[in-house]
Amino acid sequence: MTKIDQEEVKNNVFDIQIKNITIAGAGTLGAQVAWQAAFKGFDVIVYGPSDKGLNRCRNAHKEFATLFIKTRGASQKEIDAANNRLNYTQDLESAVKNADFINESVPEDIQLKKDFYKKLAELAPERTIFTTNSSTMLPSQYAQETGRPDKFLALHFANEIWEANVAEIMGHADTDPRVFNRVVELAKQIGMVPIPIHKEQHGYVLNSLLMPLLGAAGNLMFSGVADVENIDKTWMIATGARKGPFGIMDMVGMQTMYNVMKIAALKSKKKPLMDRANMIKELFIDQGKMGVSTGEGFYKYPNPRYEAPDFLK
């Protein structure tokens, strides 16, 4: 792209209107993105396939409202306005019929995502920008299923998005540069720090840095070198981090951890990685211990041991 073309892309980026946002997926991150977008003035519809999941999302939004008043200086007027901009539905067609922008958080299974986007392509307006919040997959892996590869890219958020307010934007070979730049600006509009990624990369920037840490922590624990609390304590004291690797795993969620480990194991064909993934499934997922979202993972919530005043002593 020439210098003049780049300037045109930059100048015309707001010609692409984004007012109505659909969040496809009512889980931990989906709920956070929906709340943040609504708080920043966008009309938001949360789509989820089950009433149970949508109810969890509604309850999460009540918690976020309290959190924003207590810790972020939000007024009751701002909270009421955010709530008025939020809607919830199990009907995908009604969720996307007026959407300018969609952010998807379907489980990390390539076939699930492909099937979802094929259905989405039939229902959403031609103008709608599709983005994936996938933490492990590349946009090019299912861009064609979207029916609009030029309007498809990744917009990936970190958990607790108002604290870890990075938004990683990653396109693929066919992504329209104007769409890419519009999503960068949208990230700014909802209070994120955009991190443009110039080449497709599994794990983006954040998880490319984070996963080796979590893998090393798992090695230390599963091999019996040190226990969960002392591994976390070491990391927190040495780096000043608010959480250690196992606290981070609880926040990310065991299902995501399992999916990431399974994908890595299949890709590398290393049996120890698959053994560890299966251990996560047996010890946590099969027991309903999904992390923060269910109240128990490596720690018990809402008052995990690593937040105790004496934990680092």
Image (cartoon, grey):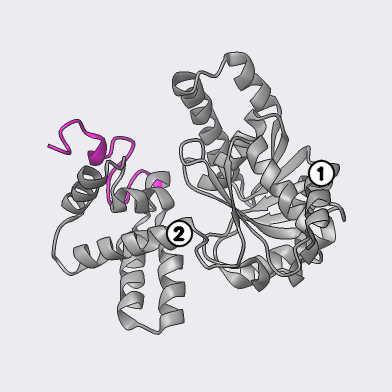
Which secondary structure type mostly characterizes the magenta part of the structure?
loop
Disc 2 residue type? Asn
The local crowd at label 1, few if under 14, some if 14 to 19, many if 20 or more residues have their Cα within 10 Å, is: few
Q: In the rendered image, is residue 21 in sight?
A: yes
Pointer 2 residue: 207
Earlier residue among tags 1 and 2:
1
Q: Which mark is residue 186?
A: none
User: Which residue is at the front of the view, 178 or 279?
Assistant: 178
Where residue 77 sits in the image (x, y, percent)? 63, 15
Q: Which residues are magenta?
A: 294-313
Element carrying mark 1: helix
Disc 1 residue type? Asn
Pointer 1 residue: 11
Looking at the rendered image, the disc whose residue lies closer to the viewer, 1 or 2, is 1
Where residue 21 sits in the image (x, y, percent)? 73, 42
Q: Quadrant of the C terminus?
A: top left
Q: Residue at x 54, y 64 (%)?
A: 108
Q: Residue at x 67, y 71 (%)?
A: 140
Q: Residue at x 46, y 66 (%)?
A: 259
Question: Is 40 displayed left or right of 18 in the figure?
Answer: left
Above or below, 3 relative to 27: below
Q: Quadrant of the N terminus?
A: bottom right
Question: Is 248 displayed left or right of 32 in the figure?
Answer: left
